Amino acid sequence: MFKLLKLELKGHQILGDLKLDFVNEGEENNGPYSTIIIGPNGTGKSNILRALVDVYRDLYEYKFNGKRPRYTTGKFNLEFELENINYRYSNFNRLTFITKNGKETAPAFLEINGEKDDYRYAKFPNKIIASSILLNDKFPFIEEKEEFENKIFPIYKYLGIRSSSSSAGTKTLVKRTVSSIVDAIDRDGFMDSLGEVLETLDLKQSFRIEYDLRYKTYFYDGNLTVDKFNDFFINWRKHTNRKTDPWTLGHYKKISSDKANVSKIVDFMNTLSARMKSPEEGSRLRVISYDIFEDNSMREEYPILLELSKLDLIKFPKIKLFKRGKSFSLETSSSGEFHFISSLITIFSEAENNSLILIDEPEISLHPNWQMRYVHLLKKLFKNSSGVHFIICTHSHFIISDSKGDTSAVITLKNGETVEAELLDYNTYGWSAEDVLLNVFGVATSRNKFLADKISNLLKLIGNGENSSGEIKRELIQVKQLGLQLKNVDPLKKIISTLTEKYLG
């Protein structure tokens, strides 16, 4: 079982000095576990998620390459638990040791169950997943080809909207969603979980992936040969209107020497011509279509579809959904539906047991009903993965009220001369919006303000010395009734209790 326990930073270039405890005492073995981080804009919520990735990335590089930390600034102290073993990676109190060249200081050290140990024995969560639909998310975008000399950072998976470090788009997210589904389609419980997501959105139990075709009459007439296939790329000027080399020419040259693979692609395209479907009645456009609830061929054929995509012989995939008897594409759905489906599906598809899942502002564009069910659905999807730890940054009071006390913790960040973090020691599950806004976010709603004003007027009456008047009792009885729904930790309830004891006996 994996649990993230602590992160302490000193001199971080953005967060400064900050200490975070992610788990309430005694809940280390409960899971799947969620830690919700809230706070005003500018307190660094997103940068905390980034810092976690950076520290783990440093530790990974240190283990495999012996390199000094280069992604995390200042001092850091990271503690986590994995399979009942405690790990601490830190550059606090640097180690000094004797070598043949004299005294040397290690830039960071690793402790395993409280004892200094070799980096070769460092362990990691199976996956670190970064999920966001923000265009300006703070997560690092690590290209698949990026390497730490001879080792990549394989445990990290970016599931945001960016397709590179400098570009983003919804098509990227759709393509990534399709890829994640294909990877997970045979996993136990995946189709049931996909069904849960669709049911939550009142959608039909159907999930269709479609590819529009390019050069339909040339490639998809059922009579394609290897020579005809090769001729298209070798003599591309006579087949296209391009004035410059096609961007696909490089991939064609890469695969053209593998005659068996080219033959396989050609055979597949001839097979497709016999089973292509029209997406809408009366439409001339013909597409490759898979409904993964009904068709189990998607996973087997996906590698060839990727080849066709790299050769620009099919377009970006589309996801078709169904509601009230009508179909619509995921890209044209409401932003809430788009974000809800793409984020939950990709997270569930990519995560494994013992994963750290970082989610930034999942509430964006979500209806309050979906916000209230977001954490519940996440944990339902991962009910068989007790080692999963979610770190969720949010402004949503509905997500706070959906966080069960024994498997959740809430951290509040407060602005001051420095940002301070507090791990709440009470359970917010099931609280009303007004309770959460007042007691957790520190925001008074009209309902909170009304009750506070009533108490203020009552205190004025008492302050005027009219202790014997019946008006005080009448006001206090009304205030007492209004305050029945307040939580015991609410300061207004404490005031009402004190006044009731004194004036009503």
Image (cartoon, rainbow, N blue to C red):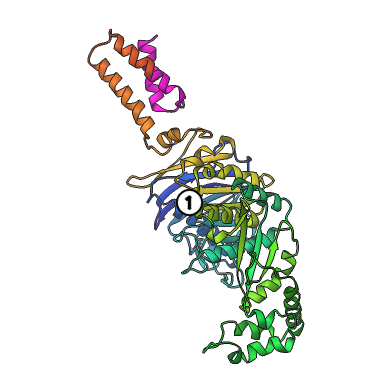
Which residue occupies 62% across, 44% down?
Answer: 379
Q: Is residue 109 above or below residue 301?
A: above
User: Circle 1: is it few (<14), some (14-19), or many (20+) Cα within 10 Å?
Assistant: some
The residue drawn where x is 67% and y is 90% is 231
Label 1's element?
A: loop
- Part of the protein shown in magenta: 479-505
Q: Is residue 314 placed above or below 204 in the rendered structure? A: below
Which quarter of the picture shows residue 187?
bottom right
Q: How far across and down, in percent of the image, does residue 10 sit?
A: 42, 52
Tell me what residue is drawn at x 33 percent, y 22 percent: 455
16 and 206: which is toward the camera: 206
Q: Magenta segment: does it hold 420?
A: no
Q: Position of residue 464 (x, y in %)?
A: 22, 15
Residue 313 location (% of width, % of height) = 63, 78
Residue 1 seen anywhere in this rendered image of the structure: no
Quadrant of the rendering where the C terminus is positioned: top left
Foreground residue among 158 and 210: 210
Residue at (72% x, 50% y) in the render: 189
Residue 485 among those drawn in magenta: yes
Kindly report the secondary structure that dominates the magenta region of the rendered protein: helix
Residue in front for this viewpoint, 212 or 196? 212
Instruction: Answer with left or right where residue 115 lies relative to residue 482.
Output: right
Q: Is residue 416 visible?
A: yes
Tell me where residue 306 sits by quadrant. bottom right
**Residue type for callout 1:** Ser
Q: Is residue 323 left or right of residue 477?
A: right
Q: Which residue is mark 1?
A: 365
Give the answer, above or below, for where 191 lies relative to 152.
above
Residue extending farthest to the front is: 282
Q: Position of residue 246 (x, y in %)?
A: 56, 85
Residue furthest toward the left? 464
Q: Height in image: 65 above or below 85?
A: below
